[in-house]
Amino acid sequence: MRPGAQPNMQQIMKQAQKMQEQVAQAQAELAAAELTGTAGGGLVTVVVTGLGEFKSVKIDAKVVDPEDVETLEDLVLAAIHNAAEAQRELAESKMGPATGGFSLPGF
């Protein structure tokens, strides 16, 4: 664009529509993705979607000790954090290119 020239509204609208389509595609990919977080060498496993919806928690019987509930709690929390970090990284990788680096609320 020349200095002082007005932006072409039609071109801006096309770019906005393209960005909207890319965001919708990225959101669909995130919704379909499932990520796994683990702790304790796989004794606790948490599955989360790319949109951050937790789907399941699996706990190996070897880690269940009525005398040591705190360790189990720590392992579950660590697996949740691990899954949430994987989800955040995936969301950034999918949404970043679609939004051209703009931050969208909730992503």
Image (spheres, grey):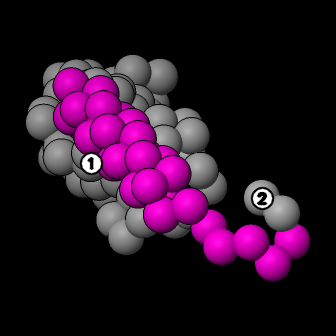
Q: Which of the two residues, 53 or 107, is positioned nearer the viewer here?
A: 107
Few, some or many residues within 10 Å of mark 2 (<14, 14–19, 20+): few
Task: Work out whether mark 1 precedes mark 2 in sequence or the reverse, and give the earlier one.
Answer: 2
Establish if 54 lies above or below 35: below
* Residue 28 pos. (x, y %): 23, 32
Circle 2 sits on which residue? Answer: 1
Percent across and percent down for residue 65 are 22, 39
Q: Which mark is on residue 52?
A: 1
- Choose top left, top right, bottom left or bottom right for residue 75: top left
Q: Secondary structure at mark 2?
A: loop
Dot label at residue 42: none
Measured Cα–Cα span from mark 1 to mark 2: 41 Å
Task: Name the kind of residue labelled 1 in the image.
Answer: Gly
Residue in front for this viewpoint, 88 or 43? 88
Image spot of residue 23 (x, y percent): 36, 44
Q: Main secondary structure of the magenta part?
A: helix
Q: Name which residue lies at 57% across and 40% down.
A: 97
Instruction: State the extent of the magenta-drawn residues as a range.
Output: 3-32
The quarter of the rendered structure image containing the C terminus is bottom left
Residue type pointed to by label 2: Met
Residue 21 locus on image (x, y percent): 32, 39
> In the rendered image, which quarter contains the N terminus?
bottom right
